[in-house]
Amino acid sequence: MTHPTLAQELREALRPLLRRLSSERTISLGKMGVLGHLAEHGPATASALAVAESISPQAITMAVRELEAQGLVLRRHDDEDRRRIWIELTSAGREKLARERSAGLGWLDRAIREKLTSAEGQAIEAVIPVLRKLVAESSVE
């Protein structure tokens, strides 16, 4: 039997944590990415969203259609080029994003306070910049 690599160990340690955090979400991670991108960068075209989220144009079209049906985004034609369609976050979309982002955080906050020692909490705090560095160097968010 081979010894797991650091990458494998990290993945296996994070998987149940991410599952637990996601268990209270009502929309997919991909749709969260679309809403988050629009919240951070403002209106975007479907092609720009596809590139930013590293997913196919077809998947973006489907996600936007579903988000629009829920009133979370709206599509509007460009004032100068009527062929261009901008996708915008609605106020309901902004509220939904905030609720979805906070889903599971109560559980995680309690787990950190109740299950970890002070030193373990500090160790987690110290590794956060390192994990952010890994993600910042990645092409996929």
Image (cartoon, helix red, strand yellow):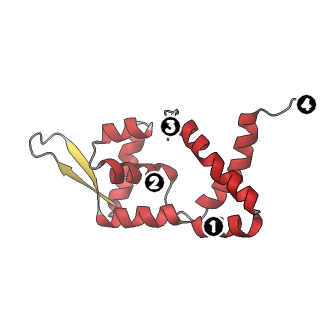
> In this image, 92 relative to 137: left or right?
left
| Element type where label 2 sits in the image | helix
Crowding at dot 1, Cα within 10 Å, few <14 / some 14-19 / many 20+, comes out as few
How many angstroms separate mark 2 from mark 3 (CA)?
18 Å
Q: Nearer the viewer, residue 138 or 117?
A: 117
- Front of the two marks 2 and 3: 3
Crowding at dot 4, Cα within 10 Å, few <14 / some 14-19 / many 20+, comes out as few
- Front of the two marks 4 and 3: 3
Task: Give the amino acid at mark 4.
Answer: Met
Residue name at image x 67 percent, y 52 percent: 124
Location of mark 3 (residue): 136
Q: Which mark is residue 32?
A: 2
N-terminal of the pair, mark 4 or mark 1, is 4
Q: Is residue 57 visible?
A: no
Location of mark 1 (residue): 109
Q: Is residue 95 visible?
A: yes
Q: Nearer the viewer, residue 119 or 32?
A: 119
